[in-house]
Image (cartoon, rainbow, N blue to C red):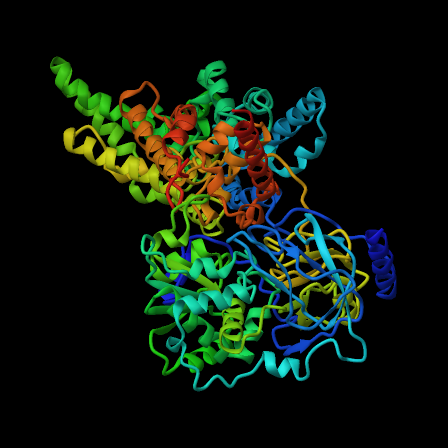
Amino acid sequence: MIGSLRERLSGLKSFPRGIHPPHRKEYSETLPIRPYVPKGELLVPMAQHIGAACTPVVKARQEVTYGEKIADAEAPVSAPIHASVNGKTGGGAVALLPAGRRVPALPISPAADGKALPENFLEDFLDRNWDGVEPTGYEPEAICEAIRQGGIVGLGGATFPTYIKLKRNPQRPVDTLVLNGCECEPYLTADHRLMLECPEAIVVGLQLAAHAAGVSRSIIAIEENKPDAIEAMRQAAAGRPGLEVMVCATKYPMGGERQLIPAVLDRAVPSAPKGLPLDVGVVVVNVATAHSIARAVVRGKPLTHRVVSVTGGGVSQPANLLVPVGTRFSELIEECGGTRETACKVVAGGPMMGPTIPHLDVPVVKGTGGITVMTETETAHWQESPCIRCGRCVDNCPLHLSPTKIAHAIKHRDYDAANQYDMNACCECGCCAYICPAQIPLAQYIRAGKNQWRQIVAQKKKAG
Amino acid sequence: MSEAANTSKASSVAEAAGGVRSFLVSSAPHLAAGASTQRIMFEVVGAMVPLLIFAVYFYRAAALVLTVVTVAACLIAEAVANRIRGRSQASLFDGSAVVTGMILAFSLPPSLNPYMAFIGGVVAIVLAKAVFGGLGQNLFNPAMVGRAFLMICFPAAMVTFTPTAPMMPDAKEAAAAAKGVAVSELTDRDVDAITAATPLYQAAKYAEAVRKIESDSANAQKHQATAEQIRAAMPSQWQLFFGNVGGCVGETSALAALICGLYLVIRGVADWRQPLGVLAGVLVFALIARLVAPDSLQSPLYYLNSGALVFGAFFIATDYVGAPLTPTGRLAFGLGVGVLVMLIRLFGAYPEGFMFAILIMNALTPLIERWTVPTPFGGHVQA
C-alpha cells in the first residue's frame, strides 16, 4: 500500500499492481559482451519462431558459409533460418527445444582454426558508427522484405516474425512504436548490455521499424534500474526526430507488452487470446530485435547470433556471450567455468517465466535471452498447502484476474468456471505463484489448464 | 542414429564440463516471495500479544488463564480432528488454531469459567472448521461460531462482566455506599453482584429508560431518574478509548486495538478495506440514527469505541477465509458488518452485535464474491 503510493509520487511510468522480485543483476550487468566461437557441433532447430516450421534448403554434408540461408518456409507466418557459422552440415537430427518440444534440426560442424566466424565479428556486431544512415530513405515495403529475409523474429522471447507486425495495414493503423528495453526478468542483462554497447544501432533499427509501420512517434522504455543504459539511449536518440525516452518503474512484469503499453501510453490492451497491442494502435519491439533490424536492412546481415546472459549463482563465471544460434547450452556453461556444486536448476531465460531444461544438450534458439543456473537457495521450493483465501494473488495480478479461482477450477476440471474467470486472459507472468503464502503453484495450474482447454477445443472441432 | 551420435557427443561435452549433471525440472516461476501461511498467522498472534498484556493488567490472571485454555482447546480439537480425518498433524503448526483460540478468548468475559471456554474452543474448531474441510474451507468464522455456541449454552455467564481490576476499588466503594456499610464489610455475594454492565449495556438501558419516559408518562419522573443515574455511571469517551471499563478480555482499550490493528494493515497482513468498512458503516449508521433520535442515543464515537468494535474491525473482520476474495467484496463485507452491528445494537435484543454481524456476513460472502468478480484489465475474454 505504501509502496504503490511511493511509486505514484516518483514520476516513473508504471502500471498498477505487479511484484518486486530481487533484481540479482549484479552477476552480469557490468560484464561487456564477449563473442563465443563454438567448438562442438551446432544443432539448428527448424522451428524457432511462432508460425510454420522451416525445411532445409541445403543438403546434408554440404559446406555452408556464415549468413547463408539454410532453411525456409512457404507460409507467410514464418522466418527463414541462416547459417550462424562457416561449416559443414550434418544429417537430419532432432533437437530438444528449451521449452520442451522436440523438433527437426540441422547439425552444423563449425570450421576449425578460428575460421568459423568472419573476421572482427564482435566489432562488426557492436558497431557504433551509424552516422549518415537515414531511415526514411528506405521504402517501407523494402524494409519489411529485408526484415523477412533476414529471418528476424521477436527477440524478447515471443519469436513472432517481426515483418508481419510492421507491415502497414490500413484496417489496423498503428500510431506509436514502443521500444522495449525493460528486461524485467531478474538475472538477465543481455538487453542492458546491448543498449550500453551499441545504442546507435538500436535507435536506427527503431527508426526503420517506425518508418515501415508508418508511425511518427516512438517511445524508448527502459526500467529505472539501468541508469547507464538510459543515458546511452538518450544520447543516441538525441537529435533524431520522433523519439522519446521514458523511464519506467523497476518492477515485474514491466516488460510484458500488456503492462508496458498501459504504463507508457495509458492504453489498455484488450485481453488475450484475441486482443493484441495492434488493437490499440501500438507495436512493441525488443531492443535486440531493433538491433537486428538495423543490421539486416542497412547492412544486409541476417539474424544469426544473439546475446545470451549466462548467469545465476550456480555458474562459476557469469558472462554476456554473443552466441551463434544452435550452440549447445553445455558449451556455453563450460565457457563460463561450468556449474557450481550448489547448482540445481537450469532455466532457459529468466526465473519468472523461463522453462527448465533437464540436461544441457539443448541448443540456443533465436528466443534465448539468458541461461540462468540457479542454486538450491536461490530457487523456490514449493510445498503446497491449502488456499487461505488471503487474496494476495487477486491483489497482485497485473491483469486483474482471480488466479486462485481459476487454478482451483482447473484442479477440479471445471473449465466452465475457469473460463468464467477469464482463464485465457492469463499471460502466465507468475506474479500469483510468487506471492502466494500457501505456496500453491498457481501459474502452473493455469498453464496446464490452458493447455488442456486448447486440446478440448481442438477435439471438439475435430468431432463436430 | 544421428540422435544417438548427438547424445554421445553431448555427454562427452557434459563430462568434460564436470560430470553428467541432473537438474531439477519444474514449472515457472522459480522464485517466490518467501511468504508462508505460518508466518502470517504468527504475525497476527504477535499483534495480539500486546492486547493480551493489557488484558492481564486489567483483569489479572483470569485473562491469561482463559486465553491459554481456549488456545489449548483449539489445538487439541484440531489434533483430534486431524486424526479422525486421517490427515497429518502439520496443520497444528500453521498457527491458525492459535489465532482462532486467541480471538475466541478475547471475545469472552474475563470471569467466564474456564471449562466453558474449553468447550467454546472445541466447538469452534470441530464444528466450524474441521467439518467444513479444514483451513481455508470454513464458511463461518470459527471463533464467532464458538462464541455463539457459548452464548446459547451459558447465556447468563456470557453476559456477566466484572469491572477492570483498577476500577474495582471505586466499584466496591460505590456498592458499600449504596448498602450503607464499610468496604471491608462487603460480602462475596455483594462483590459478585457488582456486575458493572458494559458500556453498551448501559447505553441500551439508557435508551430504554428514555423511551419509557414518553411511553409510560405516568412514571415519567422515575424513568427520568433512572436515565440520569445510568448516564452518570456511563464512562466518558476518553475512558472508553484508553480502556478502563468492563467488557470482554480483548475489549480493554480501543487505542491499543487500533495501534495493533494498524500494525497488521501496514505489514500487509490485514486488508485495510474491512476495518475501513466496519468503522465507516458504524459511524454513518450511528450519525443517521442520532439525527433521528438525538435524545436516546449516544454520540457515534461512543459506539465506535465500545464493544470491542475496533478489535473486531481489525482482527475478526479481516479474517481471510470468511471474507470475499475480491477487493470490492471485502469493502462491501466490512460495510455490511458495520451496518449490521449497529442494527443489532439499536434494535436487537443483544447490546453487542459484532458476533452475529460477522456470522451473517460470512453467510453472504459467496454471493458477494460472485457479484464482485473483477473485470480483467483488458476486458473479459472474447469467446
With respect to residue A278, does A124 lie above or below?
A: below
Nearer to us in this view, B150 or B219: B150
Residue B333 image offset from top left, x and y in percent: 37, 33
Residue A185 image offset from top left, x and y in percent: 57, 60
Tell me which residue sits at (21%, 21%) in the image: B209
**Does residue B136 show up?**
no
Q: For residue B191, which quarter of the picture?
A: top left
With respect to residue A117, does B331 lie above or below?
A: above
Nearer to us in this view, A173 or B294: A173
Residue A30 in the figure: left or right of residue B107: right
Nearer to us in this view, B224 or A395: A395
Tell me which residue sits at (17%, 24%) in the image: B224
Residue B322 in the figure: left or right of residue B13: left
Residue A428 image offset from top left, x and y in percent: 54, 47
Residue B81 image offset from top left, x and y in percent: 66, 22
Nearer to us in this view, A50 or A309: A50
Residue A383 in the figure: left or right of residue A179: right
